[in-house]
Image (cartoon, rainbow, N blue to C red):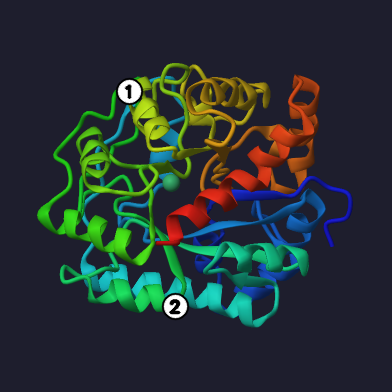
Amino acid sequence: MFDKKQLIFDGHNDVLSRLHNLTKTSQIESFTEGNDGAMDLPRCISGGFAGGLFSVYVPSKEGFAEDLEAMKESSYELSLPEPIKFSDGLTISLEQLSILLRLERAGVLCICRTAKEIYSSINEGILAAVFHLEGAEAIDSNLYNLDVFYSLGLRSIGPVWSRNNIFAGGVPFRFPSSADYGTGLTKIGIQLINRCNELGILIDLSHMNTASFWDVVKNSEKPLIATHSNVHAFCPHSRNLTDDQLQAIADSEGLVGVNFGAAFLRDDGRMLGDFSIDSILKHIDYLLEKLGESGVAFGSDYDGAVVPDEIASVSDLQRLVRAMQKHGYGEDLIERLCVKNWINILDRTWSN
Ligand code: ZN
């Protein structure tokens, strides 16, 4: 179904959140037939989007619309939203997981648990989805739910979104700013990291504050991965990675997925789409220098952030491929950035 296109396997999307906000009856239809969002099946096919990490995310009570508005400015200092109650976190996560399961039952995607499953799903022309939790508010302090979610296909966790919880400290959205805000992993957070290592669940460093980041470095035995973050040296957003963080990721033979979100790419940190996709190439070049050709991939944030107008939806992704070709990347490197690096590192993370 993806004939003659460079396929893309991507590290982060929020389509489940978008679908969750629709009426129950329209959720599956919205994805299979297409509508106003940045991601749906027809546009995945036309853009060569073959799969990726599908995020289950619990929104904060405060909402995010006002924050997105504030982030249109060139300087902002947002506060961390209030913590989420476990019962709310669990309920909403199960609802979004249910949408993912229904999409699988409808035959449009496969929830993949191994690298082999990702490859065979893509070969069969079915979207390869990895079940990711963005913020572990659905996991209890005894980690019972972790095993339950694992058996349902969970293979990736960001212990925190930009909000504190029982596991770690999240980073507030600030520009220009460091991520040095608040405390790191809690005792239960360290247990979560250890148990994820044992089970073979990816631990996502995106959205962590500085202390939490370095606590994961100290406690995790797996390659370090930030699924959707960029270069702080170019865009000093609190969500981006500093050179010493990139060095730690390189030392672990880890990976960074380049986020298409405007606020994390633009030099001025503004969440506005009127800028060139060349800025993505600029971040990739820097990351390649720091992490090598196996350590860089994509983490688009489609349906979760304002992205460059040129690649407003997944159907535009071949434009990015053409820009990479024009920029001088060879076929092999493009293949790595678009597909192979993600699948290889998932394989290394999931196998014990
Ligand atoms: Zn995110």
Where does residue 204 sit, x and y in percent of width and height? 38, 48
The residue under label 2 is: 152
**How packed is label 2: few (under 14 Cα within 10 Å), some, or many (20 or more)?**
some
Identify the residue shown where x is 18% and y is 60%. 191
Identify the residue shown where x is 34% and y is 75%. 91
In which quarter of the view is residue 128 placed?
bottom right
Q: Residue furthest front?
A: 352
In which quarter of the view is residue 169 placed?
top left
Q: Tag 1: residue type?
A: Asp
Q: Nearer the viewer, residue 22 or 159?
A: 159
For this view, does 337 lie left or right of residue 160?
right
Q: Is residue 21 above or below residue 62?
A: below
Q: Residue 244 got which mark?
A: 1
**How packed is label 1: few (under 14 Cα within 10 Å), some, or many (20 or more)?**
few
Quarter the N terminus occupies: bottom right
Residue 259 visible = no
Residues at discs 1 and 2 in contact (Cβ within 8 Å): no
Q: Nearer the viewer, residue 106 or 219?
A: 219
Quarter the C terminus occupies: bottom left
Q: Residue 339 got which mark?
A: none
Give the SS element for disc 1.
helix
Identify the residue shown where x is 30% and y is 49%. 221
Where does residue 62 sit, x and y in percent of width and height? 31, 52
